[in-house]
Image: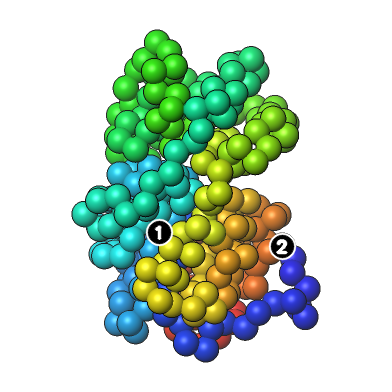
Amino acid sequence: MTNDSQRRAPPGQLKWVVSDVDGTIVNRDKEVTEASRRAAQRLRAAGVGLTIASSRPPWGMRHVAEALQIDGPIAGFNGAVVVDANGKALRETRIPADAARAALDLLAAEKISAWLFTDSQWLVLDPDGPHVAHEQRTIKSDPAVVADFAPWAAQGCKIVGASDDYDHLADVARRMGALLGTSANSGLSQKYYLDVTPPGVDKGSAVAFVSEAFAIPAASIAVIGDMDNDVAMFRKAGFAIAMGNGSPAALAAADMITRSNNDDGFAAAMDALLGGGTEA
């Protein structure tokens, strides 16, 4: 956990909130709770913008954005693709083809089920592979089954390795980082998902996009998340909140810790921000 002397105070003039989705703004059942809806309403009433940023594809967050009545930008694929409320791309970055092929080769060698997302498609080799059905329910979209990813290697916005062998996946994540170096970003977005995304963009890019697009100082932006891939946006924003169910890295990097996502921690954190408090 961040030392007390290193913790930042909540923004004196809160202008925007950037929130993770899974493990944060939705509960364990991937639902937007009534408390989260009310919290989003309170943000709007206070003139505070709300953006959701996730490793999900942008179209896999549309129902979440609609439930929260978000009209600001939505950042998918860990910041690689940013769209407006109508789904129009505002920014798009792809994984270099060589890096995509290297990542897919490592996953294949380690016998880890792989997915490839383009800006408009979710491609899988095995429709019965780990977490495919779970992902279908989560993003409310069906995959296209292909025999080979090669034709789409240059179009990838995100590659996922899905496995329930968490220790093995964590080890592969470490080796993936060493293999790809600066050619692509990689890391765990959930203990069962290893994500590979384009270089030079991460969830911190979503914070930078909001800051630039709306001329808002980073000091006036608060962020909230639960996983290692959220730490990048913790570092870019003026104030960072970790969920009670957060990973050790997220908890350590946060300025404040709220309740878990299954106990309406997002709503509690927004109450604390809007009330000027530091406890949630």
Q: Position of residue 31 (x, y in %)?
A: 36, 52
Label 2 neighbour load within 10 Å: few <14, some 14-19, many 20+:
some
Q: Which residue is mark 2?
A: 252
As measured in the structure, the alpha-carbon distance from the residue carrying label 1 to the one carrying label 2 is: 22 Å
In terms of secondary structure, where does tag 2 sit? helix
Q: Which residue is mark 1?
A: 52
In terms of secondary structure, where does tag 1 sit? strand
Residue drawn at x 65%, y 18% is 110
Residue drawn at x 33%, y 26% is 143
User: Where does the N terminus fall, quadrant-wise?
Assistant: bottom right
Q: What is the tally of numbered marks visible in this picture? A: 2
**Camera sees residue 267:** no
Left or right: 205 in relation to 186 = left
Label 1 neighbour load within 10 Å: few <14, some 14-19, many 20+:
many
Q: Position of residue 163 (x, y in %)?
A: 58, 27
Q: Position of residue 168 (x, y in %)?
A: 70, 27
